[in-house]
Amino acid sequence: MKNTIMWESPSNIALIKYWGKMGEQLPCNPSLSMSLKASVSRFELTYSPKKGGEKDLVYLFEGKENKAFEEKLSRFIASVSNDLPCLSKYQLKISSSNTFPHSAGIASSASAMSALALCLCSMQEAIDEMEMPRDFFFQKASRIARLGSGSASRSVFGRYAIWGEIEGQTESSNYFAIPFKENIHPVFQELQDTILMIDSSPKKVSSTAGHGLMKNHPYADARFHQARLNMADLLVVLEEGNFDEFARIVENEALSLHALMMSSNPSYTLLKPNTLIAIERIKEFRDKSQMPLCFTLDAGPNIHLLYPKAHEEIIQNFIQQELLEFLEDGKYIQDGMGNGPKR
Ligand code: PMV
């Protein structure tokens, strides 16, 4: 018996950042992200009953062996085998690919771990010959994905997703993400994300090490409090449609993330001079044109420029005319809000 399962899952960009974790990959504050459309990981999982003497996992990335990631996946799979008992009886062949380049400021761990978690949950269903209710299935996949990479818990859902407990919101949880299902204002329905490539060199600090820097960070408590306040404000803004307020919160989150890294011990400066120049240009253009646009950053120098689809043409002209010179080889990636994983 041999069976194959495929899932494609998006990366996401956090608007309220998760930075600092505790216990079993649980967040110190709630986060909220937008799932992307074009930046996805595709996973194909083939399973067959275990035979003695053969490896339990063979992994290929874009057709080639990748031992480091294979080991990471092996550890992850072992860590979730209590939740997915089928894993102890089958050997797995996994191959994956991304639609986006490395080190582009697009979180490949979020898309990869969510795609894999979905494959593993589908495999368990196939073996049990029993479909779970879909809400429960995605909740379980989000919980499993979280153990691989915290932000991956949010990639299991399309559009906007929240991960982490929010006071007064009984559905929110530290263990899995939930879709943000309130009435989203039209201005935030089809948000575009142009990812401006400032520098594609590999990350100076892994996210595991980065989260670790929040332990004993002098500003940790203030940060977790700030994130909760920003979250409460953003939830209102997403329904009411105030773009200026959206920009204030989202940019505050991005710069706070980097301020935390700069003030941690050891400290990291991940922004590049061109990141700062481009940010200034974006602000000047916004003041002059009154266009609804804002930026956010991941834990790196590249900029995510967010704006409603209706203004795409004018903003694309701005990018072409005023930002291109600050980008590495003039490169950027056009993306936007997506509807979540596909089987
Ligand atoms: O999921 P991790 O461990 O790769 O951490 C993600 C951290 C940020 O991308 C900087 C913020 C976030 O909420 O996605």
Image (tube, rainbow, N blue to C red):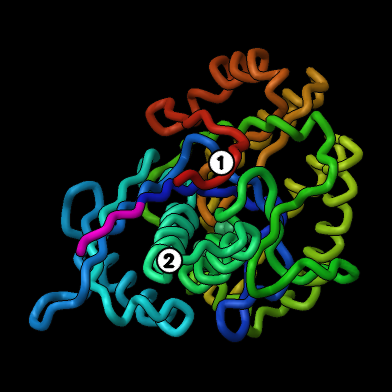
Residue closest to the eye, 129 or 268: 129
- Find out whether residue 328 is within the magenta segment: no
- At label 2, counting other C-alpha atoms closer than 10 Å, the crowd grade (few under 14, some 14-19, many 20 or more) is few
Image quadrant in which the N terminus is located:
bottom left
State the count of labels.
Answer: 2
Residue depicted at x 19% and y 77%: 50
Residue closest to the eye, 188 or 245: 188
Q: Position of residue 118 (x, y in %)?
A: 46, 59
| Magenta span dominant secondary structure | strand
Which residue position holds label 1? 36
The residues bearing labels 1 and 2 have C-alpha atoms spaced at a distance of 32 Å
- At label 1, counting other C-alpha atoms closer than 10 Å, the crowd grade (few under 14, some 14-19, many 20 or more) is many
Residue depicted at x 88% and y 53%: 233
Which residue position holds label 2? 129
Q: Quadrant of ligand 1?
A: bottom right
Residue depicted at x 82% and y 44%: 248
Amino acid type of disc 1?
Answer: Leu
Span shown in magenta: 1-5
Name the element at disc 1.
strand
Q: As displayed, is residue 276 above or below residue 281?
A: below
Q: Quadrant of residue 219?
A: bottom right
